[in-house]
Image (spheres, rainbow, N blue to C red):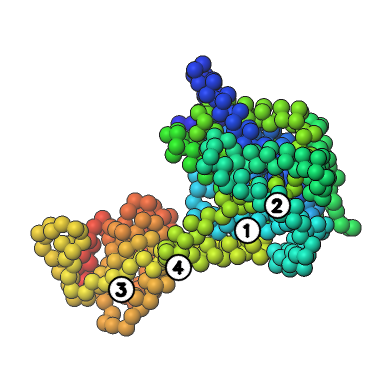
């Protein structure tokens, strides 16, 4: 069994076959090329710049491949972080982002060391679809300024205010910018159909950038904003540094840390969910099995290192991971080559990045938003139980209108409450008055005689977990008006577990029965539940002989007590 921290690179290197190297190198080169426009776009959309996006993809991509728990996972910046990173930078600057990312990295390492990799997988699907769809809509809304060339310098952060601002500046839209954005979008959409092996986003950036440069140089068409007009151009890997943290008057660093904790927790949760989902999808394609705890630790270490180079949060990227797999990558060597390709681009082609038009980059992010939206999943979940659709829509609306932190917290809470409600409704409490038919208990006829219930005996059966959601329901049935029995048999063979509320409820019931002169007999208690009851003192409360292994013994004991 693999340990908590067992990087796949170490196990792969031991038995690495030379014939796999060409496939890994080719997959790494192609994945690196695919990652170029995405890393640049995510860095700019997050509020930092192209250099920071590339640096994140290089450093985090290397660490996630070298120290992660998946053989084929490709790490880097993703669209999921854009909204929350942008908000942190607006309020706390790049120094605040460094603290939040570092805290998130520590949380991920702690989750991995605590073996919480499998627990993260239990985040409800409607919550994931809801906040992913909400992020997609938010990313889409942030690109309207650049796509239409509106020229708004300070776009409001709030979703509603943002669109009000857009409509107020609609008359200032630039036709050349719209043309560049539209052509870019068309190339991205049709590229997979014409040249499946060529990344549509990269093809659009190269083609449109060259076209815009030629039009400006030879046709005199100007006014299309480029990355170089807005940001400093990449010149190489920055040296490690600690940026200044933006603080209000009277605040200290600890105050900022406390204020950033919810955002850091959201980053950690997003990173954990997205990376493990990506690893699970990869496992389904390759037939391999990732180590979820090692993956979380690898993700955490990447997010602890990246901030000191000015980078943004990173996680496993499903699209780039699938690109790696589809091109033959089967070991972490491919991910390391992907980072090397990006480093080469940063060192050699950095100045050329400045020529990329902003409307073209906006088109790339619009397609990212469309692919993230998961609109087909919305339609599918709408046909499921209403509670799932409610969770989906609440998470979606909160993500769009408020923020991701609130959406995840409320979405998870609502999902848990509705799950508990549904579980408690599924638990049945039955009363047997005169006889028990064993043939009605299973799906085959046992030809057994019916068990007679003597007068003065009541038999109740709990079918399902005995927890706080069902405790009051059982109490109400027990207190129904009727002839007071001398013995109550509580059949618990179908109770898989009891929580403290269920145990307290049963204790109260036994104490009340004792005062009324009613004997309690427990039947079919499984070993785990029996252990919990014994720790709570039930052996002394009801007597060892009144805790019976099955209904036959329990009825015989009840008749003896009569």
Residue at image position (79%, 49%) is 224
Q: Is residue 298 visible?
A: no
> Which is nearer the eye, 156 or 364?
364
The tag earlier along the polypeptide, 1 or 3, is 1
Residue 137 disc label: 1
Check disc 3 and report its element: helix, strand or loop: loop
Identify the residue shown where x is 46% and y is 64%: 382
First in sequence: mark 3 vs mark 2: 2
Vertical order, 378 against 68 (above or below): below
First reached walking from the N terminus: tag 3 or tag 4: 4
Q: Looking at the picture, tell me which residue is in the foreground, 527 or 436.
A: 436
Q: Name the residue under label 3.
A: 518
**Of circles 3 and 4, which is in front?**
4
Please identify the quarter of the rendering in which residue 190 is found: top right
* Residue at left offset 58%, top offset 53%: 370
Mark 2 secondary-structure assignment: helix
Q: Can residue 59 be seen in this view?
A: yes
Count of labels in the image: 4
Q: At x 61% / y 48%, what residue is drawn?
A: 186
Q: In this view, does 425 lie above or below 26?
A: below
Q: Earlier in the sequence, mark 2 or mark 1?
A: 1
Image coordinates for residue 142, horizontal then vertical, percent = 70, 56
Q: In this view, does 390 lie to the left or right of 553?
A: right
The residue indicated by pointer 2 is 179
């Amino acid at each position: 069994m693999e340990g908590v921290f067992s990087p796949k690179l170490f196990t792969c290197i031991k038995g690495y076959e030379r014939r796999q190297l060409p496939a890994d190198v080719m997959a790494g080169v192609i994945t690196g090329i695919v990652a170029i426009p995405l890393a640049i776009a995510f860095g700019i959309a997050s509020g930092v710049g192209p250099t920071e996006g590339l640096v994140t993809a290089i450093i985090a991509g290397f660490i996630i491949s070298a120290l992660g728990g998946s053989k084929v996972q490709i790490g880097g910046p993703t669209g999921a972080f854009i909204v929350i990173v942008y908000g942190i930078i607006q309020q706390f600057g790049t120094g605040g982002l460094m603290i939040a990312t570092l805290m998130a990295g520590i949380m991920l390492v702690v989750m991995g060391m605590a073996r919480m990799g499998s627990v993260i997988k239990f985040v409800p699907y409607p919550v994931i679809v809801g906040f992913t769809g909400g992020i997609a809509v938010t990313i889409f809304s942030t690109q309207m300024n650049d796509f239409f060339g509106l020229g708004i310098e300070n776009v409001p952060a709030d979703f509603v205010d943002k669109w009000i601002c857009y409509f107020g500046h609609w008359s200032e839209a630039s036709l050349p910018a719209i043309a560049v954005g539209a052509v870019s979008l068309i190339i991205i959409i049709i590229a997979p159909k014409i040249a499946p092996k060529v990344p549509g986003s990269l093809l659009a950036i190269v083609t449109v950038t060259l076209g815009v440069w030629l039009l400006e140089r030879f046709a005199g068409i100007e006014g299309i904003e480029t990355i170089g007009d807005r940001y400093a151009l990449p010149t190489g890997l920055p040296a490690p540094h600690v940026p200044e943290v933006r603080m209000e008057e009277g605040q200290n660093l600890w105050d900022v840390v406390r204020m950033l904790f919810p955002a850091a927790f959201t980053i950690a949760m997003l990173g954990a969910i997205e990376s493990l989902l990506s690893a699970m999808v990869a496992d389904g394609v390759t037939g391999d099995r990732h180590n979820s705890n090692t993956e979380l630790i690898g993700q955490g270490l990447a997010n602890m290192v990246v901030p000191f180079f000015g980078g943004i949060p990173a996680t496993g990227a499903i699209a780039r991971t699938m690109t790696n797999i589809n091109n033959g990558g089967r070991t972490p060597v491919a991910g390391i080559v992907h980072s090397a390709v990006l480093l080469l681009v940063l060192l050699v082609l950095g100045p050329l990045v400045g020529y990329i038009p902003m409307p073209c980059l906006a088109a790339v992010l619009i397609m990212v938003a469309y692919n993230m939206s998961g609109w087909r999943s919305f339609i599918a979940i709408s046909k499921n139980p209403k509670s799932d659709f409610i969770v989906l829509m609440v998470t979606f609306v909160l993500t769009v209108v408020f923020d991701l932190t609130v959406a995840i917290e409320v979405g998870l809470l609502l999902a848990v409450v509705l799950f508990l409600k549904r579980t408690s409704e599924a638990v049945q409490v039955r009363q047997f008055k005169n006889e028990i038919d064993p043939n009605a208990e299973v799906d085959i006829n046992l030809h057994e005689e019916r068990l007679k219930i003597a007068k003065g005996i009541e038999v109740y059966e709990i079918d399902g977990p005995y927890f706080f959601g069902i405790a009051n329901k059982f109490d109400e049935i027990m207190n129904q008006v009727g002839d007071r029995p001398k013995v109550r048999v509580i059949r618990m063979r179908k109770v898989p577990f009891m929580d403290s509320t269920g145990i307290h409820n049963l204790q109260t019931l036994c104490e009340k029965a004792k005062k009324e002169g009613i004997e309690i007999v427990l039947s079919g208690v499984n070993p785990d539940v029996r252990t919990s009851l014994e720790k709570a003192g039930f052996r002394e409360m009801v007597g060892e002989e009144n805790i019976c292994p099955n209904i036959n013994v329990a009825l015989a004991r009840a008749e003896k007590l009569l």
